[in-house]
Image (cartoon, rainbow, N blue to C red):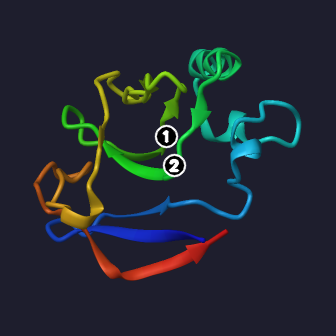
């Protein structure tokens, strides 16, 4: 089950709910399936990244465990979003981890560490008062 987290700005009261983790459809064969009924097009939004993933899988790369929908932030424009965090590993030890760009300003997104989350910049008031309360969450599947 995934979790729904409520982020709130203590300065301007802006709120945003994000969905993190994985649901029951996130089994490896379905995550890497780009055909009808598969999840790849839904969780990897970039066509070029999907093509790269398909190429790497055809070369023997495999999906590492621990993949999930995760929170990413843009320090430039303060946008917070979720992206599919994953790694592909080749039997020779090579690892591919994608990087993501902000959909607004195109700067690189940074994966947030929710276990040690420090307040982020609020997308509305730009103060570093945007955080979440781990007790205010729900579950999704």
Residue 79 place in picture, x, y as percent: 31, 42
Residue 102 place in picture, x, y as percent: 37, 30
Secondary structure type for disc 1: loop
59 to 116, vertically: above or below:
above
Secondary structure type for disc 2: loop
Q: Are there few (<14), some (14-19), or many (20+) residues within 10 Å of tag 1?
A: some
Residue at 61 percent of width and 23 percent of height = 53
Q: Whole-Å distance between the Cαs marked 1 and 2?
A: 5 Å
Are the residues at dot 1 and dot 2 in contact (C-beta closer than 8 Å)? Answer: yes
Residue 132 place in picture, x, y as percent: 28, 70
- Residue on which disc 2 sits: 67
120 to 3, vertically: above or below:
above
Which image quarter holds the C terminus? Answer: bottom right
Lateral position of residue 87 relative to residue 50, left or right = left
Which of the two residues, 2 or 129, is positioned nearer the viewer here? 2
Quarter of image, res 46 = top right
Which image quarter holds the N terminus? Answer: bottom right
Residue 58 place in picture, x, y as percent: 71, 17
Q: Residue 6 carries which label?
A: none
Quarter of image, res 26 = bottom right
Q: Which residue lies furthest to the bottom in this view?
A: 135
Residue at 53 percent of width and 25 percent of height = 90
Lateral position of residue 2 relative to residue 127, left or right = right
69 to 90, vertically: above or below:
below
Residue at 43 percent of width and 51 percent of height = 70
- Residue on which disc 1 sits: 86
């Amino acid at each position: 089950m995934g979790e729904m987290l409520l982020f709130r700005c203590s300065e301007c009261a802006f709120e945003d709910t994000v969905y993190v983790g994985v649901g029951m459809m996130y089994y490896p064969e379905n995550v890497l399936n780009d055909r009808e009924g598969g999840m790849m097009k839904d969780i990897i939004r970039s066509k070029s990244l999907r093509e790269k993933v398909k190429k790497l899988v055809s070369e023997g790369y495999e999906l590492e465990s621990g993949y999930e929908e995760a929170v990413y932030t843009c320090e430039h424009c303060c946008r917070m979003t979720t992206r599919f965090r994953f790694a592909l590993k080749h039997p020779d030890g090579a690892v591919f981890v994608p990087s993501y760009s902000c959909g607004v300003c195109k700067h690189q997104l940074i994966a947030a560490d929710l276990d040690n989350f420090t307040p982020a910049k609020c997308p509305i008031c730009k103060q570093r008062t945007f955080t979440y309360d781990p007790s205010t969450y729900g579950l999704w599947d």
